[in-house]
Structure formats: C-alpha cells, structure tokens
Image (cartoon, coloured by chain):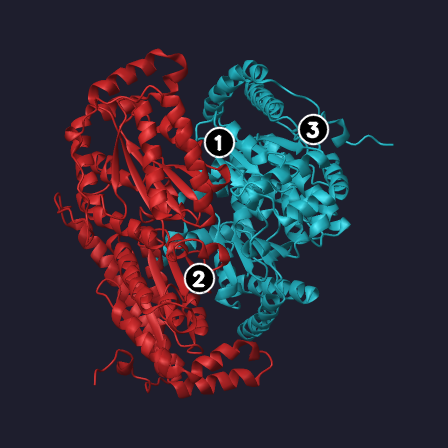
Chain colours: A red, B cyan
Amino acid sequence: MVITMLEHVDLQRKMTKVEYRMDTDVLKRELALLQHTLKDKGLPVIVLFEGWGAAGKGSLISDMILTLDPRSYKVFSTVSPTAEERRRPWLWRHWCRIPERGRIAVFDRSWYPETSIERIEGNLSEAQAKRRLESVNRFERQLTDDGYLVIKFFLHISQKEQKKRLKKLSESKETQWRATRQDWERNEKYEEYYKVFDEMLEATDTECAPWHLIGCTDRRSALSEVYHIMVDSIRQALAEGEERKAAAPKQDGKIDPGPFSLVKIPSLREVSLDKTAPENYKELLKEKQEHLRAIHNRLYLQKVPVVIVYEGWDAAGKGGNIKRLAAALDPRGYEVVPIAAPTPTELSHHYLWRFWEGVPKDGHVAIFDRSWYGRLMVERIEGFCTPEEWHRAYREINEFEKELFDRGAILLKFWIHIDKDEQLRRFNDRENTPEKRWKITDEDWRNREKWDQYEIAVDDMLRYTSTDFAPWTIVESQDKKLARLKTLDTVIAAAENRL
Amino acid sequence: MVITMLEHVDLQRKMTKVEYRMDTDVLKRELALLQHTLKDKGLPVIVLFEGWGAAGKGSLISDMILTLDPRSYKVFSTVSPTAEERRRPWLWRHWCRIPERGRIAVFDRSWYPETSIERIEGNLSEAQAKRRLESVNRFERQLTDDGYLVIKFFLHISQKEQKKRLKKLSESKETQWRATRQDWERNEKYEEYYKVFDEMLEATDTECAPWHLIGCTDRRSALSEVYHIMVDSIRQALAEGEERKAAAPKQDGKIDPGPFSLVKIPSLREVSLDKTAPENYKELLKEKQEHLRAIHNRLYLQKVPVVIVYEGWDAAGKGGNIKRLAAALDPRGYEVVPIAAPTPTELSHHYLWRFWEGVPKDGHVAIFDRSWYGRLMVERIEGFCTPEEWHRAYREINEFEKELFDRGAILLKFWIHIDKDEQLRRFNDRENTPEKRWKITDEDWRNREKWDQYEIAVDDMLRYTSTDFAPWTIVESQDKKLARLKTLDTVIAAAENRL
C-alpha cells in the first residue's frame, strides 16, 4: 500500500503549557521582528491555511496574527465565489488578492477548495480538477519565481476528533451555528474527503511551495509548529533574497515558451507592406462593422469572453484601428484598457497582477491598447526588468493566456506593422500638424532610435508567444485602411469559428 | 396645474440628414480636440444617461463615443446591484467608479434608477427615496466642488413612441430579446413612472449638476443636442478651471460642519491625563476582550457594519491599542486599513474615493489606522490641500459618515491622546531601544515641532466632526493600558447599545 501524505502526520503529539511557552516565547518575538525586516526588504508573503472543518483554522490564525502588527497583514477569508467572481476565470479572484511586496496576506482557505471539495460537492469533473491543480502549480510557481514566499498549512485531524469537536460546538448556544449540517455531512464522508485532500496535497506539494501538514489534535503543539515554520520560512526567504542580491545578476537566459504548441509566424522583415485597401473601403468597413455588431450580440448572449491585444510600432495606427473596431461593438459589452507605465502600486505586485485585474467577464470584450507584452519589448530593451525576468516571461505569458483560453475566451493579438520610413513620414506629419502634435513625444523619437533592437524583440515575441490558442496576427498598416479591414476580418473569423 | 420638467421637453423636433451634418460635423471635431485638452488639464468628466427604455440610450452613447479616443473614456453600464454590492452602502459602487482626473466616465444608467424605478419596482419607501435623492445631491456636489464635471442627460419619449419602438424590436428575431416583458410592463404603467421620474428630476436638478432633458422622438436632433451640451459643458468647465487657477487662491474660509447635530467635546487642553490603569489591568483586558469577542459574533450575525477610526499623536500608542482591540475580533470579520500618503492614482481622484473603497461590508469591522481626517490635520498644516478644500472637508466628512450611518453602521472615532512631554519621553525611548528604532523617523520629529499647530487643527476637527451619529472619543493614553481599556469599553458600549 502506498503511504499517503496525510498518513505521515503525527496526530498524537502533545505539549504542556510550560513546554509551549518555552518553545514559542522566543519564536513570537522573532516573528514580530521579522515582519519589520520583510517590510523593509519588500518580501511579499502568502500564508494559507487549509484543512478539515473544526481543525482549528480560525483560532490558529487568530493566535498567530496576535504576534503581528495589524498594519502589516491582511486576512482573507475565502468562501464560495460570488456571482460576479464566477463570471471570470476561477483564478481571477485569487490573483487579485496577492499582497504587495513587504506585506503578508493570510488566507483562511484559499484556492484549494476549488480543486478538492468541489470535486465532491460541486460538479467539477476529474479532468477539470486535474487542470485546476496544474493551474495552481503554475500560479504558485509564478509567484515564487517573482520572489513571493508561499507558506501552505494543511490542518489535519482524525474523523473521530472532528466528530468530537462538532458535538462540542453543538452543545453551546453561542457556538452551535458554527457546526452546520454541511460539517456533519462532511464528517460522515470523511474517507471520501481524505482521498481527495490527499491527492490534492500530493499534486501540489512542489519545491517552490511545499505543504506543511500539521497535526491538530493538540492545539498547542499545532501552534508551535506553525510558529516554527513561519519563522524558518521567512528567515530563509530573506536570506535567499540577500544572496540573490549579492550575486551578480545573470545577463543571459534561455527563452522557454513552455509546453505549448506554437504557430508559425513570419519575421517582420518577411512581411510585405505593399498592399493597399480596395477602392470601396468605406462600404467594406461599414459592412464588416455591421457584421461584427451582430456577432457581438451573439457572443454576449453566449457569454464568450474576448481578449484583443493591440501592440505595434509608434504611429502605426493603433488608436484609429481600435476606434473602428470599438465602433462596431455595443458600448455596454466592451472596454478599452489603455496600458501605461505601471503605477507604484502595480510595481509592488507581480507584473501580471494588473492584467489579471483587467480580465473581462464572460460575454465581454476587453481591448488592450498595449499589454503584458511590454515585458518582452520596452521592459526588456530599457532594462526595466532583469534578463532573467524577461526570459521567464514568455512562458508566464503563455500560461496566463492559457488560463483565459481554458475559461473559454477568444484571444487575438495584433501586431500593427509599418516600416521605418513610413514611421518617419508619420512622425514628421504629426510634428507639422497642430491638432496631431499631442500625439508625438520625445519618447517616440527615442524609441525610434532603437528600432533595430525592437525588431529583434518583436520577432522573439511573435515567435514564442504565438500559441495555437492565442495566435498573433501581423497587421500590415502601411495603408491604415487595409489594416482596419484586416483586424475586423480577423475578429469576425475567430468569433464565427467559435460560434 | 404645475408644469413639470418633463412637460417642457419638445418631442416634435426633427432634423434632416443635411441639417444634422451641418450642425454636428464641427461639433464632433471640437469634441475630439476637447478630450485632449481635458486630459492635459486633468478635468474629470462624468456623463450619465438616464431615461425611458427604448429612448435610444445605447445607440446615442455608441454614436457619441465614436468621436472620442477609446483610450480616454470608459463606459459603465449600471444594472441592479450584485449581492456583493448590496452588502455595502448603496452609493459605494458609484463612488468606486468615479473617473480619474483627465478621464471621461460614461454611465449608461447611473445612480438614478435606485432613487426612482426602485420606488415602483423595489421596496423603497418614500422616506428612503427622499434620503437617497439627498444623498445624490451631496454626492454630486462633492464631486463638482472637487472640480469634477457632471453632465446629466435624461432621454424622453412619449408613451406612444415607446410602444411603437418596443413593437418594432419585437418584430425582428435579432432584436426581440431587447424588448423584455419588463419593458412592456413599464410601458403600460408609463404614467406612474412619469411621475416618479419627474420628481427625481425636480429634486436633483441642481446648479452644480443640472439635468439636460432631451426629446428623443427624432434621433438626429437628440444626438445634435447631446453634442452641443457636451461641447459647451466641457468648454465652460475648462474655462472655469483656468479662471480659478488665475485667481489668487483664497487663503481663508469658514468652517461649516453641515446640517448635523454636534456633540460637545472638550478641547485637548481640558483633558486630564493623570489617571492610570487599575492594578488588575491584565484581568480586565482579558475580560473585556472576551466580552467583545462574543459581541463581534452577534454583530456579524446581525450584519451590522462597524467603522472604527484611530487618530492620535505620534507615539501615542495607536498601534498597540489597535492590536489589543483586533485581538478580540474574529480575523474573518475585521480588517485593519492602514492609511499612508495617497498614491498617484488616489491623488487623481476625489480625496474621499479611497476611503469609500475601504468601507466595510455589512457585518464586518473596518479599523482605520489614520483616516480621512488627514485632510483636516496633516493636509491642512502642510498645505497639501488649499484652505478652501480643508474648510469644505468638515462638511464633506460629516456627510460621508452620515452615509455610513444611514446604512446602519456603528461609527467610532478615537483620538489617542498624550501630552508633549510624554511624546518626547517616548521618542527618546524609541531612539535608544534597537528593536523600537524602526518606529521613529525624522518626520516624527518634524511633526513634533508643529505640535501647537496640530493642537489647533485637532481641536477644530474634534469640535466640528463630532456628530451624534459619529462621535469622537478622546482616549487618555499617557498610560497606554488605561487607553486600551477605554477603547474596548467604548466599542462594547456602542455595540451593546445598538444590539
């Protein structure tokens, strides 16, 4: 017989009051000091508590946070997703709650019930459950790669012990509401849950975010273990952070797009920019917009989310292109999300955090005017992230888009393309036309000087993030009208294909 | 007979295609340019559309925004509040959506259905409706006082016209889902809605945010009117902004706490700081914490929201006091909200915006470690806002707290008090104790130099914002233990009084 993870947990351990004091007094002081250090060093910490009902999650959390300054942590109590949350990818609400650097987020239950309990109580198929467990591993890996510390506790008690506790809760008028019918039902089906929990633990016990299984028969010994693990983990993470800082930053890396099927795409130099729009452009545009309007209606009714990314050279005609596309959509069902330089709050989170926040609801269209691909272009070229970080980002981005795709989203990514001469013509035109002058800045000229570097970066980006579920389309925009027709066509084709 | 606002609307007006073109071509170009100016000048604009079903809101909005750069506006489509939104004051979700300076928020329905349609379809009493209309006027006044431009459109059609349009929608398969049973029912009860709309318009047609009633029988003339009003309003707001900038900023003002009953409160100098905690402090603390723990449970079950504000001198013992209070609460039901200097995003909104975001759900406790009262202290003294702004803030803050109170919240505000000598002792102690040194900064010493100025500001604040629904409590913290008992006592008393 295979020995499961839960079987290894010592449920007999006990501690006297004196032992507990001797053991934890120093630890508590240390933890109190560590929270200031982690604040100074900008270490973001996620502490999550999962486990059996009545195992003592609430009281353990209450006790543990007593040692902390209430200003430095936030407790999230995760319940079933709200109707609003259900309209987005399941990881969405969890991504939105990750802490800023230097802060602690304590989760009283987290993303795990949706990979385990829902298998029994919801209508989560085995295949879905497996996919969610993989999503969780990717999620936690992305966080820890970015310097997050993720401490995971599973609080274990036996079926008998659980029953005893539920009984005790039921006996007092003050506490009886805490032992619900659901709790009793779960206690009866303990074996079934055991199996599901064990599989969950096994599947998500990763090197970057290992599980800590805590025997909770005795409250004091459980608390003591929690303190030990908290202090050790934070101390180690701080030390590793220092080491990393002390070491010379790696100047190279290898692009790894992750285990996804890539679609072949030409390099920018191979793209011909000679074609122009047909003479009946106006008619065609109107026709296609009408067509898209009808489709948008159907996408809305069928609750298909759509994510459209616009990237491209400065002055390539992104704005006008977006405008023509948006004009075909019902304003109640789409949103244009302009992406500027990150704010300080955004900078103090994982770089994908702000994009997760902008993920559209089912049935809605989100048009990103610039996007997470900044990581692979401006951030790479200007050194706003380390080489290690941008090398890692190809895979992270593909994984991010995979989450959206798994939710049922249509993903389209447009590279709005012109050549270097055309850009110069447009820049000059902007300089010389009063009502266009706001469109051109010194930065545009500076970026232009780095055209060749950008070309390399864009080719890499197109090549390694054009997956079969989220392909890039190069949109020839030397003639803006042609470009507008092409984006409309692409959106229509993708939507019809789905519907 | 009284002539109502809606009766004034011309429903006969018509425009030919040529007239429309001649009228609006220039306007559209102007609007396109104005959006860049308002972005540069940081003018935040709210455009809201209310009116009859099938009056053409959707298509008018679609058309109007075609002239705008999709990156500069955002369309919000307001539907019934979600379950999550219902757990907070009704204005909460609307406050959260106000635009940043320089951006346009277009509302396809806004806060008005909750003051009108709900009177007929929901269970909103006349008294509640009246209170909501007052809330709306305060809301819009606070926004416009802060430089927001609020443009309000009401789209009017006759009962007959509405019926005709619903019929037409029902005839096509593509559009029949848009004429719902509810729409038909509303058409039948047109008279009833008419009365309610008219009262709503009458009650909220204020100088700072007047209504624009648009006859929508003819689409072109309606659109033309919308363009005229948009352009005129934005142009005027920009001009007024320039004027205000050119004029010398007013260096004085008058404190106006608004039409609220104030509770008498001693000035800081009158407060005696001699008392110390009883010998059995430890026991008492534990006892009171136990007591509060039980009460918190009941507050949670009865869904009473609680807002607790901590303000006080540096080193007065706020942190430790909060910790003792929080220790008595179930971590799943409270949150400590530390308020630091505003982020750039926060600065580019109304100053109350970020606090509205932190408003607790029903049944939850929010403990603010510093708060909106920064406006009346540090911002006043350091000149982070104009004298006009902080003078206005007394009333705005009372109004804000009134909204929370009307929602059923318990509001408690603590001024944690010590004298100047005690502060010096604690500062020195912090300097001399290694593990406390992180607590003391140069800024603390600089603030200390302004003790006398702060004393005046605090006295003003206590005097003019201690309302009967949100009173201040001065907490003598010369002896921190005494202070801890007092805050616990105050919270317990207020909660018991409510329960």
Residue on which disc 2 sits: A75
Spot occupied by residue B231 in the image (x, y as percentages of width and height): 56, 21
Residue B291 to residue A92: above or below: below
Measure how far apart labels 1 and 2 are at the Cα level.
34 Å
Q: How crowded is mark 2: few (under 14 residues within 10 Å), some or many (20 or more)?
A: many
Lateral position of residue A213 relative to residue B470, left or right: left
The N terminus of chain B, quarter of image = top right
SS at mark 3 in the image: loop
Instruction: Say which amino acid is labelled 3.
Output: Glu
Spot occupied by residue B275 in the image (x, y as percentages of width and height): 61, 62
Spot occupied by residue A354 in the image (x, y as percentages of width and height): 37, 45
Q: How crowded is mark 1: few (under 14 residues within 10 Å), some or many (20 or more)?
A: many
Residue nearest the observer in this picture, B451 or B154 = B154
Instruction: Say which amino acid is labelled 2.
Output: Val
Labels 3 and 1 in the same subunit = yes
The residue positioned 53% from the left and 76% from the top of the image is A178
